Amino acid sequence: MALKGYTNAEAEIYRQKKLVRLTSLMGATHVLLMAVNIVLAFTPYSKAAFVSVVIYLTLFGIYVHGVDLLGELGYERIGFFKAFKIVSILVYIVTFIIAILS
């Protein structure tokens, strides 16, 4: 079903752009949570990093779902998103360990 004023092809392009924005936003929140873990490492509240794990895993699930959908839709520049998916989890684990051990 087309959106009002759009053809089906235009509506599909709009949905894909919206999904790219959402996936990029989820990636940015991952980077933000990593920065929060580093900041927590230098404060007496480093144990609060455990709360960020729940938030991160929820956002990571949304991000992975978005990347998979983009792949199914045939998005051309999916390589960056797939690489960030792997790098993100590894860097988050490192920043979490730094926050907990400090």
Image (tube, rainbow, N blue to C red):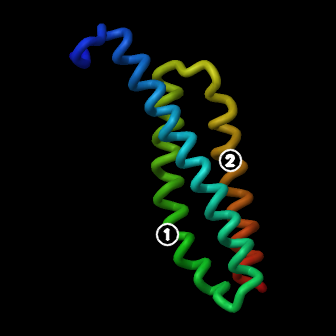
- On screen, residue 73 versus residue 92, left or right, reads left
The residue at the point 34 percent across, 17 percent down is: 11
Q: Residue furthest bottom?
A: 44
Vertically, is 21 above or below 58? above
Residue 9 to residue 15: above or below? above
> Residue extending furthest front?
5
Taking 39 as reference, is 67 above or below it? above
Q: Amino acid at mark 2?
A: Ile
Q: Is residue 89 left or right of residue 60?
A: right
- In this rendering, which labeled residue sits more in front, label 1 or label 2? 1
Mark 1–mark 2 distance (CA, rounded to whole Å): 18 Å
Q: Position of residue 46 (x, y in %)?
A: 67, 85
Asked whether, in this view, residue 74 is left or right of residue 6, the answer is: right
Dot 1 and dot 2 residues touching (CB under 8 Å): no
Mark 1 surroundings: few (<14), some (14-19) or many (≥20) residues within 10 A: few
Name which residue lies at 78% across and 85% down: 102
Q: Nearer the viewer, residue 9 or 93?
A: 9
Q: Position of residue 1 (x, y in %)?
A: 21, 16
At horizontal 52% and vertical 32% (from top left) the residue drawn is 20
Q: Give amino acid for label 1.
A: Val
Which of the numbered marks, if any, corresponds to residue 86?
2
Tell me which numbered mark, 1 or 2, is placed earlier along the sequence: 1
* Residue for badge 1: 54
Q: Quadrant of residue 98?
A: bottom right
* Nearer to me, 96 or 45: 45
Q: Is residue 9 placed above or below 31 in the rendered structure?
A: above
